[in-house]
Structures are given as C-alpha cells and as structure tokens.
Image: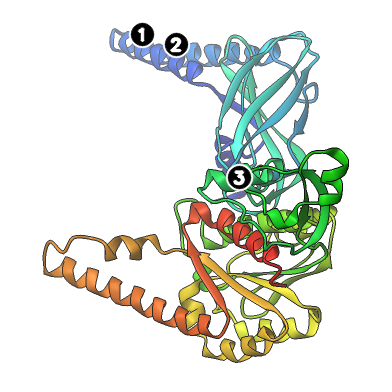
Amino acid sequence: MTKSLKSLWARFLFQDKGILPTKRLLFVYVILTAALAIAAIGGVSWWYVLTINIVVFLVSLADLFFSPKKSQLKFNRVMPEEMERGLSYVVTIKVDNPSAYTVSYRFIDSLPQSFVHPFPVRGTIAKDSSVKIDYDTTAADRGKYEVNKLYFRYRSLFGLWEKQTTVELPQTVKVIPDLTETRQYLENAQKFLLYEGLKIRKQLSGVGEFAKIRSYVVGDDPRKINWRQTAKLREVMTNEYEPEHGKFITILIDCGRMMGAELKKGNRLEKAIEAAMTVVAAALQKGDYVSVIAFSKEIKVFVPAAKGMAHLQTILQAIYHVQVDAAESNYAAVFQYLEMVQKKRSLLLLFSDVRTFLYEESALVYLKRLRSRHLFFLIGVEDQTLVKRSKAAPTDIQAAMVKSIAQQQLLFKKREKNKWERQGLQMIEAPEEKLAVTAVSHYIEMMNQNLL
C-alpha cells in the first residue's frame, strides 16, 4: 500500500486530517445516479449525465464554506490524573467554536485499549459558543498511560461533507488499585468489619497502653474499675486500654506466576494489592510503622518503614504499577533480603498463593530463622473452583473422579498447613470478596493480643 493510500485509509479510520463525504452526500448520489441511469436508457446523452454529476459535485463542495475552519476550533481535555481500577470516571472535552456556523460533531479520544471506549461521542455546537462534552470511561488494568490525540469530525447543517482534525492533547494518567475498601475502613473501621460478619476482638485484659477513663458499662472487666475516680465522681468508672502504638508491620506482596489466576473481578494480585492497602491504612491509622516489599523471582519494590497517613501515598505510588511476572516466586530470596532490611521485630504479613507456598520447602528453613525475631502470617485467596468441585454431587464416574481429586487436594493443603502451623507459622485462605476484611481483622487481633 502506497503512502497516499495509507493516509486515505487512516482518514476513514478517524486517524488523520482531511475532508470526507458523509452518508447524506452518498445517498444523494445514489438517488441521482439511479435517476440519470433511467434517463440514459431513455436516450439522454452520456455527456449530459457526466455534466450533471460534475455540477452536483461542485455544488456540494459549497457546503464546506458553511462550517468553521479547522484553525478556529479550540480543544481542551480535562481528566483525572489518577483513576482507580474498575471505577467509572468522567472525562470532559472543552470545545470553543467562535465561528458564525453551527456544527454537528462526533469524536474519538485516544484512550488506551484497557479503557472502556464509549465512542464515537456525538452532538451539536452552536455558533459563537463553548461547550463541555462529558463521557464516562473505566480503566481495567493498573499502570501509567499516555493519552494524546483527539480525533474530531464536524460538519455544517447541510451535512454533505465532513471535516476531520487531529488535535494533540498530551496527558498522563495513573491507574491505581481500587481503594473502596480502604476508604470504608477509614470512615468506620468497626462497621467495615461487621459488614463482613466479623468484629474487632477484645484485647487481653490489662494489656496495652492506658487510653482514658470512662463510665463503666455492662460487660466491662471489673478488674479494670478505677476506684479512685469512682469515689470522686460517685459513679463507677473504668480504665480503658488500647494496643501499644509504634509496632512494625511488613507487608509482603507476591507477584509470581500463580498470582495471575483470574477471579470474578481482576486476578489474585489485584485483590492482594487492594487488601494490602487496607491493612496499610489500618496500621498507619493506629500509629504503626509500615514497610512494603513486592517480589517475584527478585525484589520489585521495597518501601522502608515509616508511620503517618502521608506514608499511605508513598506506598501507593510505589506499588500501583506492579504486575504479575511469568516466573515462579523466589520465597527464599525475599526472606533472605528481609533479614537484611528489617532488623526490628515485626509482623510479616504475606499475600500469596497458599498452595504454591506450601511446596517451597526451602522457605521453611528461612522462616524458622525469622520466627525467632518476627511474627509470620500468610493469607491467600481461596480457590472457589476447588471448593465447589469438592462439594459437587458424584452423578457419574467422571464427576466422582473430579470430586475425589478435589478432596485429595484439599486434604493435602490442610495437612501441609498443619505442619507449618506447628512451626508457629500461621496461614489462612479467604474468599476474594472478604480478603481485605479478613486480613485487617487478623492484624487487629494480633495487635490486641500484644503478640508483637
């Protein structure tokens, strides 16, 4: 294909500048051609037919003078610099039309392929006016994207010819994890946990830092009654304690091959990152120090420990773009690295695939060393397909075999988990929709029990 033909083809595909005939003009020519063909059969001269076609074509070109020049239209795009994965956002295109002509338009924006494309967007712009055109889009994959060109077509009210212009509007947008659950926790921690059928466990009696003195209510531990304040106020008062602040929490996020398994919404890594961000928010809100390590066959991201809610953005900007690798995870390497960078006792919260982790015998050697200094906890997404097949009715031989194999896999996993837990290494699996709340609940329980 020659360069000119490529340019013409790109023009028809909304990818170049130029002038194109509209369907209305083509319809006029179809009617005219049919009428002239009948006339030609009746004996009208072919020169006459040709002349009529040329005259109609030249008259149609006059339509171009009743639409604005390309240089007259001004464009601007307003879109968020950050978008959360899976959530809908509004993008606004501002168009200034200072000309004396009303135009009908349609346009396509150069969004990345992973975004929802509601194009072409159509409408009308009155003469000597400015309009704001909104459209909704949703990003399916995390990462950093460039949004550059806007392809805009417009025509006059006669609508015989259509002008097309390509506008350079370079912008960068970051697609970050869905932070809906993180916001829900920050708004109301107890409501967030109760919504999923869990509640914040009570801490051990008398353990933690003194918080305040309050009125005694039914169910409080009588041993925590403050008799001095009770005598002074002539009302039963009790001491309230809260977990000690300033603990160290290390979040480990597995980005290996098995974390790419697809779930109902996204994959395992997406759910792990969203749950990890919720735990980070909970820990920072309580005054703990949080560090994050993302890894696969090597360390991808390391964020040193810090406290304060401002650290949440530091972590988010560091891990929002991490993707699943095609390689197996190297647990031994990350635990070895952890020994070097985390000297203080901390809670190691690993988001990974439990089944893959159980096959890593070498990781057990490093974890036994880490256990003397750190508290380890592994959480993964439950394999709903395996659970469903293990509970299916054995209606025929094949179904019975599938059920038997699924139950065998579950028994193996249970046996191996018991072996690791006897070594003091806790593991748990949760449904994908409850991964965040389960992780936060166990974090709070460990803090309240003063296990660190």
Res 97 quadrant in image: top right
> Which badge, 1 or 3, comes first in the chain's sequence?
1
Where does label 1 land, which residue? Answer: 44
Q: Nearer the viewer, residue 197 or 16?
A: 197
Q: Amino acid at mark 1?
A: Val
Q: Is residue 92 above or below residue 15?
A: above
Give the x, y percent position of residue 109.
Answer: 64, 36
Q: Amino acid at mark 2?
A: Tyr
On the rendered image, what quadrant is the C terminus found in? bottom right
**Furthest-left residue in view?**
396
Cβ atoms at labels 1 and 2 below 8 Å apart: yes
Residue neighbourhood size for the residue with mark 3, other residues' Cα within 10 Å, grouped as few (<14), some (14–19), many (≥20): many
- Say which residue appears at 68% left-offset and 59% top-offset: 321
Front disc: 3 or 2: 3
Residue neighbourhood size for the residue with mark 2, other residues' Cα within 10 Å, grouped as few (<14), some (14–19), many (≥20): few
Cβ atoms at labels 1 and 3 below 8 Å apart: no
Give the x, y percent position of residue 288.
Answer: 79, 62
- Say which residue appears at 68% left-offset and 32% top-offset: 91
The disc placed on residue 192 is 3
C-alpha gap between disc 1 and disc 2? 7 Å
